[in-house]
Amino acid sequence: MLVALMPMASLGEGESVLCRVQDRDILVACVEGRFFAVDGRCNHAGQSLAGARIRGTEIRCPLHGARFDLATGACTKGPAAGALNTYAVLVEKGKICVEIG
């Protein structure tokens, strides 16, 4: 199911926003003109990734410093061990949409 989240213009370069979609937190980020969507909570301790630092396509959990690749969800630095779920992002009629399910 495709879910529209926000106007494309509302998310600038290097920014991210946490969205609540069907009882799950999804973080949407804009990096180098591309949009990425991953789980919105670190899978190590459940910390929200809202406001987390982004460098390139890597996001860093603000609690314990775990890092994840926004493109693949892969954990690139512990203490987290597993990957974040990723979601397909499409832009339709100027809106950022994610594929859920």
Image (cartoon, helix red, strand yellow):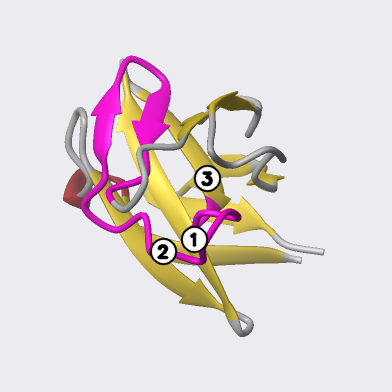
Identify the magenta region: 39-62
Q: Is residue 4 left or right of residue 72?
A: left
Q: Secondary structure at mark 1?
A: loop
Q: Secondary structure at mark 3?
A: strand
- Mark 2, Cα crowd under 10 Å, few <14 / some 14-19 / many 20+, is some
Give how far across and how far down residue 45 sits, in percent.
51, 62
Outermost residue on the bottom side: it is 23
On residue 41, the disc is 1
Q: Which residue is mark 2?
A: 47
Name which residue type carries label 2.
Gln
Mark 3 vs mark 2: in front = 2
Where 96 falls versus 83 (above or below)? below
Answer with mark 2 or mark 1, whichever residue precedes in sequence. Answer: 1
- Mark 3, Cα crowd under 10 Å, few <14 / some 14-19 / many 20+, is many
Q: Which residue is mark 3?
A: 37
In the picture, the quarter occupied by the C terminus is bottom right
Q: Is most of the magenta stretch helix, strand or loop? A: loop
Q: Are marks 2 and 1 in contact (CB under 8 Å)?
A: yes
